Amino acid sequence: MKKNMTKFINDQAVKREWYLIDASGVILGRMAAKIAVVLRGKHKSCFSPQADCGDFVVVVNAARIKVTGGKEMQKTYFTHSGYPGGDKLLRLEEMRKRHPVQVVRHAVAGMLPKSRLGKKVITKLKVYAAESHPHQAQNLKKLEV
């Protein structure tokens, strides 16, 4: 009698897709949760928690995302230079003006594992503040959020 064996997939055996998300008018948290699932590969039947089996995601119009409630004025981003007194706090409103791409990247990175795998997975996220992007050759599939 032959037992059913669980098949674990490795990184080389994965067939990767490219997805496009238009972030204009989309709520940041809901979009970031959907992106994290696709980047990690949890939407596939061949998902393995120890392997990078996710797909690529291209986000355009990152400057036009929406947030709910009072997050525009209350949400802060903390950075530190490493020197005494070198801490900086930026509100979401300011971060949007200076680095709209980092707002989306930071939200998605917070939903991924904090490990070597998480660092590898976040490299498959491509975020652009405007409509244009250099990934037309990848035959992007539209992903609804």
Image (cartoon, rainbow, N blue to C red):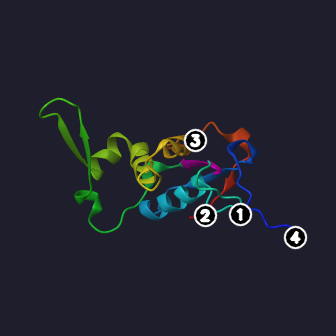
Q: Residue type at mark 3?
A: Ser
Q: State which tag comes first along the sequence, 3 or 1.
A: 1
Camera-side residue of 71 and 1: 1
Drawn side of residue 9 relative to residue 105, left or right: right
Of badges 1 and 4, the one in the foreground is 4
Label 4 with label 2: CB-CB less than 8 Å: no
Label 4 and label 2: CA atoms lie apart by 45 Å
Can you tell which mark lies on residue 45? Answer: 1
Q: CA distance from mark 3 to mark 1?
A: 32 Å
Q: Secondary structure at mark 1?
A: loop
* Magenta residue span: 52-59
Looking at the image, residue 21 sits to the left or right of residue 11; the answer is left
Q: CA distance from mark 3 to mark 4?
A: 57 Å
Indicate which label's residue lies in the foreground, 1 or 2.
Answer: 1
Query: Residue 2's image quarter?
Result: bottom right
In the image, what residue occupies the spot 12% across and 34% down? Answer: 85
- Identify the residue shown where x is 66% and y is 57%: 142
- How far is mark 1 from mark 2, CA to CA? 20 Å
Instruction: Give the SS element for disc 2.
Output: loop
Mark drawn on residue 69:
none
The residue tagged 4 is 1
Residue 144's disc is 2
Assess whether residue 81 is covered by the magenta stretch.
no
Residue 130 place in picture, x, y as percent: 50, 44
